[in-house]
Amino acid sequence: MDNTAELKLNGKTFTLPTLEGTEQERAVDVSQLRAQSGYITLDDGYGNTGSCKSKITFIDGDAGILRYRGIPIEVLAEKSSFIEVAHLLINGKLPTSAELTRFSNLLTENELLHEDMKFHFEGFPTSSHPMAILSSMINAVSCFYPELLSGDPKQHFEVESARLLSQVRTIAAFAFRKSRGLPINYPKPALKYTANFLHMMFSNPYQEYALDPVVVRALDLIFLLHADHEQNCSTATVRMVASSKANMFASCAAGVCALWGPLHGGANQAVLEMLDEIHASGDDGSKFINAAKDKKSGKKLMGFGHRVYKNYDPRAKIIKQACDDVLSKLQISDPLLDIANKLEHAALHDSYFVERKLYPNVDFYSGIIMRALKIPTEMFTVIFAIGRMPGWIANYREVMEDNSGRIYRPRQVYVGPVNQTYVPIKERK
Ligand code: ACO
């Protein structure tokens, strides 16, 4: 195969190298194009731009394939756990028993926040969105470990990453307790990652939270399914910040902010609010589907569509199944699930959605499971952030370990005013 591409511009031909990934994804390397020709490439929203080479996650959006480090998501969902998958993503391999014990112990040793962090939570009004608290607190944690912010980050990566992965869930639970005016619960070293989070969220001084294995497994699966998703908005943000050599906490706090938006991780909260609105209005979903097709309505079918998947999101398939299982095991009948099923059926048979290849994404059913697990709606995106942390850390690591890596700095095509004269304030109209 010829491994170059030719580009003709103003009568001149430029030869550009091409490259192929391990899954036969092909790219034209345009890194020297501006130096050679004076042209840059323009790709609004980066839909056709590869920003890096990565060994972590592979997605084939047309075929509906997702693999972490080469292992299909369906296999991991069935056989693995969130912490095992976190090890896989961050360290590049599934852990042996000894490695898993070491990894788990490290998480337990680092689960407590510095006691003074409690005062930081006091400063937020009770109406604060927990994503705002989460991003601020992740950054604040780094102030308590100044030794981690100096020297070579590779040397303290292991403890730094364990601290972040473990404490993100402590911060999330504290933020929730604070928002409800409830006393905080310290983590319990005897509990595993997901069970410990549920304890910190829901135990009360008068009543210990009763851990139900169905609930623990369902939440662990939600974390696992969200653990990485290649160069999405938040992960690309983490890499962008990391490329300036900012520390891991700052980079991942930026990821939390990017995730918060309703077109990204905030969609799981938006889906439930949409289903609630449909239910409250007495609609069975058909009116809403029509509104979602009408651009003037300002409505979208939240939980549908994806930049990369032009097929069923494989995570949505797993979550849909898990949703049915969990609701049946917990003997919950939720009218919102009926509406979601109807919306999905209608959309999958409607030419607007079919032609645009809009399928349910991971957020479409995850909110219904979380509601069944009694997780409040405003915490949905926080749950996503806890799940995504291993992916962010793995991507941070790739950037940090790339010795040839340059700061991420896109260019633009300037379309603003040209060479304006400065008008003194008194003469301005
Ligand atoms: N409802 C109605 N129409 C939609 C939807 C939707 N959910 N999603 C896309 N479309 C339409 C667009 O209006 C556009 O129509 P047009 O061709 O007539 O202009 C067409 O489908 C293509 O959509 P784009 O906006 O170009 O797709 P893009 O890749 O930019 O956006 C996104 C993807 C943001 C996910 C979009 O589908 C969306 O807003 N979905 C709803 C929010 C959501 O569920 N987000 C979660 C994504 S998954 C995640 O982040 C974990």
Image (cartoon, grey):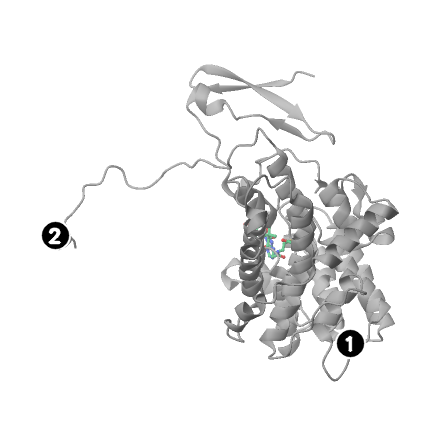
- The circle drawn on residue 321 is none
Q: Would you place residue 185 above or below residue 246 in this image?
A: below
Picture quadrant of residue 166: bottom right
Q: Would you place residue 20 above or below residue 12 in this image?
A: below
Q: Would you place residue 41 above or below residue 336 in this image?
A: above
Q: Nearer the viewer, mark 1 or mark 2?
A: 1
Can you tell me whether the CB of the residue at mark 2 lies under 8 Å from the nearest atom of ligand 1?
no
Nearer the observer, 267 or 103: 103
| Residue 129 pos. (x, y %) | 55, 68
| Residue 288 pos. (x, y %) | 62, 67
Type of the residue with mark 2: Glu
Disc 1 to disc 2, C-alpha distance = 69 Å
Residue at the disc numbered 1: 209
| Residue 140 pos. (x, y %) | 54, 59
Quadrant in the picture for the C terminus: bottom left
Q: Earlier in the sequence, mark 1 or mark 2?
A: 1
Say which element carries label 1: loop
Nearer the observer, 165 or 355: 165
Say which element carries label 2: helix
Number of marks in the rendered image: 2
Type of the residue with mark 1: Tyr
Furthest-front residue in view?
147
Picture quadrant of residue 336: bottom right
Quadrant in the picture for the N terminus: top right
Residue at the disc numbered 2: 427
Is residue 252 shown left or right of residue 64?
Answer: left
Nearer the observer, 165 or 343: 165
